[in-house]
Image (spheres, rainbow, N blue to C red):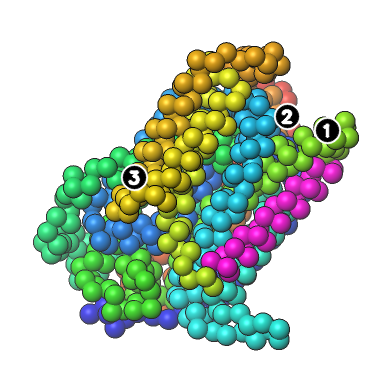
């Protein structure tokens, strides 16, 4: 029935995708005016509204992987995917209880400044040396994975573009275009651009998710959502709707949950978001918002893929050119169920997912290079702190340069043909060993200044030895996670047996923990101009997205699709209007100190 209804991308889809990319670039260029200091560029001046930062943090936690890799896993394993991909709920729950508050109280200017204050400047240099290359590789792999499916969906995979001295494939061209857009808005607008565009991308992803979810089950039930759910229940493969996969492979699920606790509390981009809001109360609200979204939304984009398993039990025959055809299941649903125009919106949502992950990484990596390396080297060599204007310029250059390296990496990955498998394990090789000292360093105070270097090195060496000399291929991911975390933790605690001999290190550590013991609860006396303007920008653009979706619903399609699209578009337009109204209300209060005083009484 549906096998014959798969559509191709047409001019309307290309118009939507092109408009979306232009929107992101324009927002980044416009928001350059928000950045007067390097603090504005890298932490939004510490005045980013908590719910903007929360939405940005949530969508930065996944990329096209959720619509691609997670879709493939769901197609194969069923309900176990919900357990796996909603695990961020528990990670953000730990953040609410402990780490959101501590990150905000740490009063940092860049994520790795934590390492300098808690351990030593040498630790920061060491981590920078070890983390930049894997991070750039991760960025390049993210762009590559994204563009495989964007290029396939748009039908440009087989293109060959002759540029004289060299040729580009359609896939390579899509990676370059995507990377250039990232470069423009990230290097121009800084963290404000990242957070505001992430918020818009959240709304686009949500609209697409709320379209595909009901349509998949309505189509499965031949017009009845309830019948579609019933059909899934009756026709699913044995064990598909049970937790059998979780029971049969508990070590994998435990390792994934452990990596979730680490990644959602110690990763640099998480810390950057927590310390960029005005108060620790706002940081904890961020954690709650992210936890709730992580519990609810994965179900909405996982369940339709389970319906796809019933539609196309042999999906490999539809995508023979892909190594893992199951990973195209969500894209196939969109190409089947949605009209042209809304297909373009879906591709834009997948673009949004990866861009959100990538723009976040670019900003915090540039922050590390500028705040933790460039400034320190300048002070040590020239005995002079660089001026704000110089740091802002260097920050933009760093973000732009890192983005270029990510694009080059993506092209190298594509041409090497064998590096994709490496991407599946690179997180487990580096992150557990390097981030465990961050988690432990916040809550355990007695370790010396060299503890992070020694413990992370021990973990990294252990993972390397096991990966090279021990044949544990079926369980490589689990062994890497457990080995890296276990060895790093043991060595970290053993280091407490040695007393710190450097008086300067003792004093620096005591000052840091004094900050952690001092609540960051003072409410700002007034809204920042950038915070106020951000509401207006997000409100206007959200309303514009809603109007666009309503317009796309007029494309010839079924009444069900049209009704859903009109409803979701109208909802987005109304939400945008409410946000603009809130901006105007706060602007009036800001302009009238007496009114503000009365409001607070």
Give the crowd class for mark 2: few <14, some 14-19, many >=20 residues within 10 Å. few
Residue under the image location 69 percent in, 30 percent down: 121
- Say which label, 1 or 2, has the lower sequence index: 1
Q: Is residue 74 left or right of residue 454?
A: left
Q: Is residue 521 above or below residue 222?
A: above
How far apart marks 1 and 2 lie (CA) works out to 43 Å
Q: Quadrant of the N terminus?
A: bottom left
**Which residue is disc 1 drawn over?**
379
Is 317 positioned to the left or the right of 99 in the image? Answer: left
Give x and y (percent) for residue 433.
Answer: 48, 38
- The residue wearing badge 3 is 478
Question: Judging from the image, what secondary structure is the residue with disc 3 in?
Answer: helix
Q: Return the x and y of residue 114 as percentages of the image width and height.
A: 62, 29
What stretch of residues is rendered in magenta?
A: 389-414
Give how far apart the Cα atoms at labels 3 and 2 are: 58 Å
**Image check: 551 left or right of 516?**
left
């Amino acid at each position: 029935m549906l096998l014959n209804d798969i559509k191709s991308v047409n001019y309307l889809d290309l118009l939507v995708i092109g408009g979306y990319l232009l929107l992101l670039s324009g927002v980044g260029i416009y928001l350059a005016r928000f950045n007067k200091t390097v603090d504005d560029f890298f932490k939004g001046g510490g005045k980013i509204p908590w719910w903007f930062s929360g939405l940005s943090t949530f969508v930065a936690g996944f990329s096209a992987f959720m619509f691609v890799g997670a879709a493939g896993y769901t197609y194969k394993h069923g309900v176990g995917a919900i357990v796996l991909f909603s695990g961020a709920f528990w990670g953000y729950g730990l953040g609410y209880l402990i780490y959101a508050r501590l990150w905000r109280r740490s009063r940092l200017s860049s994520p790795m400044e934590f390492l300098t204050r808690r351990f030593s400047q040498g630790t920061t240099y060491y981590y920078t040396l070890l983390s930049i290359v894997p991070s750039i590789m991760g960025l390049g792999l993210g762009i590559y994975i994204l563009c495989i499916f964007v290029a396939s969906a748009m039908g440009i995979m087989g293109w060959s573009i002759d540029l004289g001295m060299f040729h580009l494939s359609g896939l390579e061209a899509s990676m370059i275009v995507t990377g250039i857009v990232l470069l423009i808005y990230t290097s121009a607008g800084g963290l404000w651009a990242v957070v505001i565009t992430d918020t818009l991308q959240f709304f686009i992803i949500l609209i697409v998710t709320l379209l595909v979810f009901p349509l998949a089950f309505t189509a499965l039930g031949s017009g009845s959502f309830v019948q579609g759910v019933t059909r899934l229940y009756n026709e699913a493969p044995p064990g598909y709707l049970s937790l059998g996969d979780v029971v049969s492979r508990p070590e994998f699920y435990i390792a994934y949950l452990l990596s979730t606790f680490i990644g959602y509390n110690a990763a640099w981009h998480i810390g950057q978001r927590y310390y960029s809001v005005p108060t620790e109360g706002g940081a904890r609200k961020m954690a709650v918002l992210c936890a709730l979204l992580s519990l609810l939304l994965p179900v909405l984009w996982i369940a339709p893929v389970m319906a796809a398993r019933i539609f196309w039990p042999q999906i490999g025959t539809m995508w023979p050119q892909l190594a893992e055809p199951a990973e195209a299941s969500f894209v196939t649903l969109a190409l089947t169920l949605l009209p042209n125009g809304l297909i373009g919106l879906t591709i834009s949502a997948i673009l949004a997912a990866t861009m959100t992950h990538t723009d976040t990484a670019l900003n915090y990596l540039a922050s590390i290079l500028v705040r933790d390396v460039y400034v320190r080297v300048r002070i040590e060599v020239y005995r002079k702190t660089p001026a704000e204007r110089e740091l802002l310029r260097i920050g933009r250059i760093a973000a732009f340069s890192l983005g270029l390296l990510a694009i080059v990496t993506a092209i190298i990955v594509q041409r090497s043909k064998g590096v994709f498998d490496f991407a599946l394990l690179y997180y487990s090789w580096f992150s557990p060993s390097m981030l465990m000292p961050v988690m432990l360093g916040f809550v355990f105070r007695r370790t010396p200044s060299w503890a992070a270097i020694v413990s992370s090195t021990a973990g990294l060496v252990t993972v390397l030895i096991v990966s090279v000399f021990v044949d544990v291929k079926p369980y490589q991911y689990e062994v890497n996670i457990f080995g890296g975390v276990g060895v790093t933790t043991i060595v970290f605690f053993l280091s407490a047996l040695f007393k710190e001999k450097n008086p300067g290190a003792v004093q620096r550590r005591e000052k840091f923990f004094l900050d952690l013991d001092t609540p960051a609860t003072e409410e700002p006396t007034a809204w920042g101009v950038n915070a106020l303007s951000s509401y207006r920008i997000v409100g206007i653009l959200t309303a514009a997205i809603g109007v666009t979706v309503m317009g796309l619903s007029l494309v010839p399609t079924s009444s069900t699709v049209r009704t859903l699209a009109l409803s979701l578009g109208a909802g987005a337009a109304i939400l945008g209007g409410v946000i603009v109204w809130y901006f105007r209300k706060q602007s009036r209060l800001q302009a009238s100190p007496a009114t503000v005083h009365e409001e607070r009484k």
